[in-house]
Amino acid sequence: MLSKAEVKIIASLKLKKNRQETGLFVVEGEKTVEEALLAGWTCDKLLLKEGYQEKLKPVSTLHQQQVLLVSEENMERMTQLSSPSPVLGVFRQQSLPWTWKAGDSNFVLLLDQLRDPGNLGTIIRIADWFGLAGVFCSNESVELWNSKTIQASMGSIFRVPVQYGDAMEFAREAKAGELYATVLGGTDLRAQKPGVGGIVMVGSESFGLSPALQKMAGQQLTIPSFGKAESLNAAVATGIVCAWLRS
């Protein structure tokens, strides 16, 4: 049985400051919770809505501790979604090992001041799909444990290493030829041949990649436009560039 105090604590994780203070975050949805458990992430509490025990038995058997049943009313209080899922997990924040280094025969993404949590989650999923070594976020980028980021990643957040830090310092680790800048007004990426590894830099949704990072890049990539749209969504552009990297 979940106490009123525990319901209040879990509900408070909707706020970034409370996630930072507790080191906890919420995962919702059968598939995403299952991905987290299969990846071995520590689950403090696994909650099932009353009446869903049999349907969600495959998920509950992955959890080593007691599964708690909660009422629909309490699930609505704790959810961070527009409508509550029948399964909710409270997990401990952790960092996956970062193994990539300059000169490696693989790529990482550098996200410069990315502010949209949905874009961050989708980009992590894209990195997972294309087998990239990790995602580096500038300190000004959106928080990793935002519920929209978790949902958009569709479980990839539990497999892809993500680091935060100074974007300029990280970019300096690579040679200019290993730095790829996604910009408007650069060279058509179809006319360039990708290397075997390096850092692909993606800018914020509003302002793009900072001029300082652009200047450091040995290759400035542009996705050619054939219509009248002013720009592409950051995650969409990242997906296209990643497909080019693997071409």
Image (tube, rainbow, N blue to C red):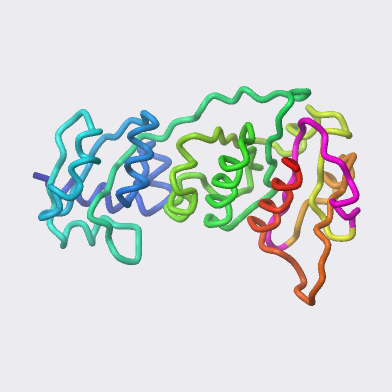
- In the image, what residue occupies the spot 82% across and 39% down? 194
Residue farthest along the bottom direction in this orientation: 228
Residue 162: quarter of image = top right
Of 170 and 217, the residue lying toward us: 217
Q: Position of residue 58 (x, y in %)?
A: 22, 40
Q: Quadrant of the C terminus?
A: top right
Of 136 and 196, the residue lying toward us: 196
Q: Decide whether residue 80 is among the magenta residues.
A: no
Q: How many marks?
A: 0
Of 93 and 9, the residue lying toward us: 93
168 w.r.t. 146: above or below: above
104 w.r.t. 21: above or below: above
Residues in magenta, as a range: 186-206
129 w.r.t. 173: above or below: below
Residue 176: quarter of image = top right
Q: Position of residue 56 (x, y in %)?
A: 20, 47
- In the image, what residue occupies the spot 82% across and 71% down? 226
Tell me: 40 left or right of 3.
Answer: right
Q: Decide whether residue 194 is among the magenta residues.
A: yes
Tell me: 87 left or right of 109.
Answer: left
Q: Position of residue 78 (x, y in %)?
A: 26, 55
Q: Quadrant of the N terminus?
A: top left
Tell me: 91 left or right of 170.
Answer: left
Of 92 and 182, the residue lying toward us: 182
Q: Position of residue 181 (x, y in %)?
A: 81, 46
- In the image, what residue occupies the spot 68% across and 36% down? 108
- In the image, what residue occupies the spot 78% across and 27% down? 173
